[in-house]
Image (cartoon, rainbow, N blue to C red):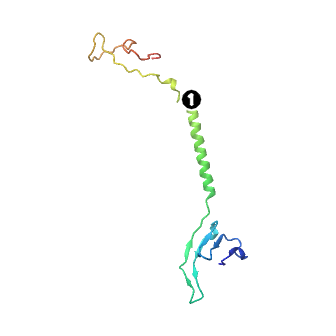
Amino acid sequence: MPTEPKNSRAFSNSSYSLNHKTGELVFDPVSASDTGEYTCQAQNGYGTPVRSDPVHMQAVEMNVGGIVAAVLVTLILLGVLIFGIWFAYSRGYFNSKSLPSKALLCTVPPSGRSSGVTSEPSPVTASTCAGLDLQGI
């Protein structure tokens, strides 16, 4: 590998640059074609050059098709959810008019007595449930 790949005709499309002072190899941008084995060789003119153990770099491209498919599926599901809510609302499933405006919470004493428990039913009237709205019941 040449130290200046852009100056070499064979490496003109490569994406790396080498810093001569630090020995740092930078890939900008990294691509799948940069996948491979890399070593570092140090030499200073005295003795024999020393080479590092090879390091394997694996670079993979983004799966753009998978990302687009995931976004489309998410948008379709969101559309179906919105349609379902709209459909249920238009059919009256979320209509608050079908629910009573106030709950009927009152104690009805047995007829003729002021307290006690009896099994006979007692009519609920406005006088026995004072202060509650009994309209529409």
Residue extending farthest to the right is: 9
Residue tagged 1: 91
Residue 82 in the image, given as x and y percentages of width and height: 58, 38
In which quadrant of the rendered view does residue 87 lie? Answer: top right
Residue 70 in the image, given as x and y percentages of width and height: 59, 51
Residue extending farthest to the top is: 112
- Residue shown at the point (60%, 50%) measured from the top left: 71
Q: Mark 1: few, some, or many residues within 10 Å (few <14, many ≥20)?
A: few
Residue 47 in the image, given as x and y percentages of width and height: 56, 90
Residue 54 in the image, given as x and y percentages of width and height: 55, 77
| 98 relative to 16, above or below | above
Quadrant location, the N terminus: bottom right
Quadrant location, the C terminus: top left
Q: Nearer the viewer, residue 37 or 69?
A: 37
- Residue shown at the point (63%, 53%) measured from the top left: 68
Residue type pointed to by label 1: Arg
Secondary structure type for disc 1: loop
Residue extending farthest to the front is: 21
Q: Is residue 103 left or right of residue 94?
A: left
| 115 relative to 92, above or below | above
